[in-house]
Amino acid sequence: MKKVLKIMGIIILVPIVLIIILLICLSFKKSVPSRYWEKVETDGAIEKKYSKLGEYKVNSKRYDAPETAEEPGKKKFFEVWYPKEKGKYPLIVMINGTGVPCDKYDDVFKHIASFGYVVIGNNYEINWNGKHPSETLDFALNTEEIANMIDRKKIAVGGHSQGGMGTFNAITQYENGAMYDVAFSISPTNKELGIALNWGFELNTKNVYAYHLDKINIPMMIMSGTGPFDSDTVIPFDKMKQYYHELHADKVMFRKSNVDHADMLYHANAYVIAWLDYYLKDISENRKAFFGDSPEIKTNLHYQDFCSDKE
């Protein structure tokens, strides 16, 4: 019995150790290459269209955010990227992964904003539970300088890794989650790993509340990479399929071939923007990337394991 318990402990411990090693590596460098959109290989016409900067010149601004008991003494902030041209734009709330605060992947913000979006994120370390993303949305909508740029009827949320898990919770666990119109989750931490890391519990209780995907009623795109860390530890393919089948609105699922967890933060962003444009800007042409008899992603040489369903 002791031997069995020891083996079980090792099985649980190994993914956690891998996560810690990854965090140490990420803490010393930017999480995306500069001008990554010029370096990612593309295949499909819609993917190529969005694998470059959009037509809008952009600015960015940083705002102070409240400190937290979990990270005492650490300066917290919100970061916003937006088009220079005055107007009302859809809002995208970005949720960062562990060890990847918003300022470590600001080229992702710039890329999305250049297609006519206001993009906001934060540098909080804890985002899996959706709390700080919910506060980030409130901050954007209640800060006049930002609110004046936002079309409040067009709001999306998305995140990577811990932030992919936080995306689900931001939608289902907070009152303002009802304001989201569309979402995307990149390499979300799977439920069992999240629980092993003590993510996914109501604070100070044993009640699990993460991953209530059956409560999500807006279009959702879930993606991951086939690299070993993503497919063996963070989001194994069988678990991603399970989460996909729990969704009840328009949905898309795919994996990017030969790309691992950290690089998924930027490797499929052309399709992320195409997804946002389809639902928030009514770019009907983008339907061909996701739905129909022969969706572009399904035939794209750089992707695999594609599924979609339009309700």
Image (tube, rainbow, N blue to C red):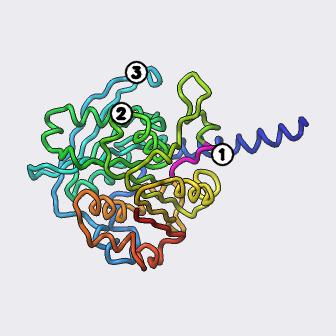
Which residue does the image show at 33% across and 62% down from the upper left?
Answer: 275
Q: Is residue 229 left or right of residue 81?
A: right
Q: Is residue 222 magenta?
A: no
| Cα distance in 3D space between marks 2 and 1 | 33 Å
> In what quadrant of the picture does the C terminus appear?
bottom left
- Residue denoted by label 3: 73
Which amino acid, mark 1? Pro
* Location of mark 1 (residue): 15
Q: Alpha-carbon neighbours of circle 1 within 10 Å: few (<14), some, or many (≥20)?
A: some
Residue drawn 86% across and 41% down? Answer: 4
Tell me the quarter of the picture where residue 204 sits.
top right
Q: Earlier in the sequence, mark 1 or mark 3?
A: 1
Q: Quadrant of residue 55?
A: bottom left
For marks 2 and 3, the one nearer the N-term is: 3
Please name whichever residue, 45 or 109, is drawn nearer the observer in this view of the structure. Answer: 45
Magenta extent: 188-193
Compared with residue 248, is residue 310 higher up or lower down, i.e. above or below? below
Q: Say above or below: 199 vs 279.
A: above
Horizontally, is 144 left or right of 122 in the view? left
Of residues 144 and 75, which is closer to you in this image?
Answer: 144
Question: Nearer the viewer's eye, disc 1 or disc 3?
Answer: 1
Residue 101 rendering spot, x and y as whole percentages: 40, 40
